[in-house]
Image: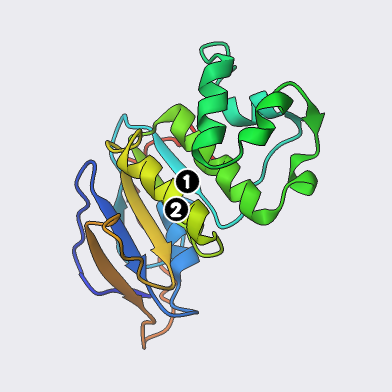
Amino acid sequence: MRLSEPHLRVRPGERLQVTGEAGAGKTLLFRALAGLWPWGNGRIELPKDKQVAFLPRVSYLPPGTLREVLAYPSSGTVLDDKDFAEALAAVGLERLATSLDRVAPWNDELTSDELRLVAFARLRLHKPDWAIVDEAFETLDAAAHQRVKDMFEGELAGTGVVYLGPKRHNGGLFDRTVHLAKDKRGPVLKPIRIKDVAKAKAPA
């Protein structure tokens, strides 16, 4: 895989989208950014001492109460019911506000789109410095997509975003777009150098 810009720097608070056709390596780039893909050629630097959240295509929600799922990795004691209710309402899941203390297999009980929206609600609660997102917009309907856009332009306006997806999203959410293409040389199996990787404090 190869980015259209050989040296790419994303500024704090900037919202960048990375597009590419199927098979270009978007998910591999997501994994490399998260420090989970140790092969490749190049260097990735993440900000030191900053809160970085990673949202995969489908977020896994651990068993437990919905309050614990949303508050993870914190204990939830610093958040009150109003915080949780507002976060759920922001993504259109206000019906779940009465289920905060219910234990359920949330991965089975919620649809794939609802799982994505729960992950975005978690972002709103934690307000990380950075969010790196892998194709989590692609299946959302127009109303849900607008809610997430409003959230990034409102409560999460200070959060920098790197979004990886197959198509370009217009509407003013992103400041710029770069393209990811297949590298004609094929995969280069050399260790990626990861510098200053900040631990993800609010994984989704």
Vertical placement of residue 112 versus 187, above or below: above
Q: Nearer the viewer, residue 53 or 109?
A: 109
- Name the residue beneath numbered marker 2: 133
Q: Residue furthest bottom?
A: 184
Number of marks in the rendered image: 2
- Name the residue beneath numbered marker 1: 54
Tag 1 secondary structure: strand
Q: Earlier in the sequence, mark 2 or mark 1?
A: 1
Residue at x 29% of width, y 34% of height? 48
Q: Position of residue 128 (x, y in %)?
A: 38, 33
Label 2, label 1: how far apart the Cα atoms are? 6 Å
Question: Does the rendering let one see residue 1?
Answer: yes
Residue at x 68% of width, y 40% of height? 61
Q: In which quarter of the image is the N terminus?
A: bottom left
Residue at x 58% of width, y 49% of height? 116
For disc 1, the neighbor class at 10 Å (few under 14, some 14 to 19, many from 20) is many
